[in-house]
Amino acid sequence: MSARPEQGVTDADAAGDAARPAAPAASGAMPAAPAAPSAARVPSGPQLPVPLPPPGLLPWLRIRLRIAAAVATLLGGFAVQVLLFPLMGARGRGYAMTRWSRLMLRACGVRRLPARVAPEAAPGFAGALVLANHVSWLDILVLAALHPTHFVSKSEVGDWPLIGAMAKRMGTLFIERGRRHAVHSMIKLMATTLGKGESCTVFPEGTTGDGTTLLPFHANLLQAAVESGAPVQPVGLRYLRDGRPTLVTAYCGDISLGQSACAVLGTPGIEVELVATAPIASAGLTRHELADRTRAAIAAALGMPG
């Protein structure tokens, strides 16, 4: 729902991470000069050519129709939150936002493949800390379309017009980037939320990658699972076109939100696959051990190098 929800939460021992390798060129995408960085995010991760929709008039007509559908769905979701949320319980609000997320994906032309969820996973990921790889601004919609959850996002998102208000009503947990005390406060809040049997979702890479490899996982927020005894639920996300992985959805490097949105909205046949592996018990493990095991589980599920 937000642009790139970089959490800005990094481990002190991760400060020396090596520079990340450049990603392979996108198939069918023409190299272009890097766009000016979006004010909403800090460019990082792999550098890719700016993705472009297919040539011709039809893709641009498709973009305009999908923008209209997405705006209508966005406004409809906001109206439901304002008018109906006060009359709903937590379960009703969660169901409404799950349905809304599915409609938003449909409006954007993205088809959800049947989720592959391990039988050991708790129903609705209840009480689990969900960790997922981060590829696109679509990721939040994909995860929210499966089960209600509390996303952890940078505090600036809460100030964005309309989207910020919707994120707050969806139960998003906001954290101030770069403030160590804010990390400790967020860990306590997440531990309390998990203790109530609700799920929280974090993108431990801290930024978006291109979907072909995993970036290093930051472990700070996994302390919430350690303190609450909650299991960690690894979730892998992969975007496909014609049955093969695609870079059209990648939102990283110097690609702006507008450029990414145009590429997604103008490209037909985009599908998203979600794979949830068996949860990892947090008992007896440190946050770093949990991060390493979760990263390995997601890499194995997506067939990526660990």
Image (tube, grey):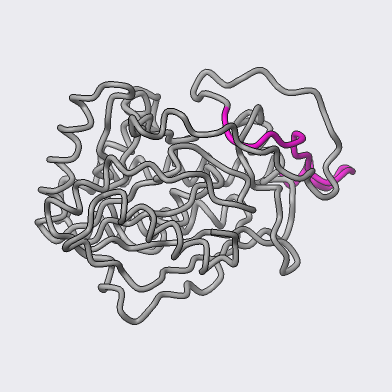
Q: Is residue 65 above or below residue 283?
A: above
Q: Nearer the viewer, residue 282 or 154?
A: 282
Of helix, strand and loop, which mostly describes the magenta segment? Answer: loop
Q: In this image, 231 relative to 252: left or right?
A: left
Residues drawn in magenta: 44-63
Q: Nearer the viewer, residue 70 or 259?
A: 259
Q: Nearer the viewer, residue 73 or 12?
A: 12
Q: Nearer the viewer, residue 266 or 303?
A: 303
Rendering coords of residue 220 (x, y %)? 28, 40
Q: Is residue 201 above or below residue 13?
A: below
Numbered circles on residues, count: 0
Rendering coords of residue 17 (x, y %)? 49, 34
| Image quarter hosting the N terminus | top left
Residue at 46% of width from left, 59% of height from top?
Answer: 102
Residue at 46% of width from left, 29% of height from top?
Answer: 16
Residue projecting furthest to the bottom: 119
Q: Is residue 167 above or below residue 237?
A: above
Rendering coords of residue 209 (x, y %)? 58, 43
Residue 260 is covered by the magenta coloring: no
Q: In this image, 240 relative to 98: left or right?
A: right
Residue projecting furthest to the right: 56
Q: In this image, 42 relative to 129: left or right?
A: right
Q: In this image, 191 relative to 293: left or right?
A: left
Residue 45 is covered by the magenta coloring: yes
Residue 12 lies in what quarter of the image? top left
Residue at 32% of width from left, 57% of height from top?
Answer: 130
Rendering coords of residue 302 (x, y %)? 56, 65
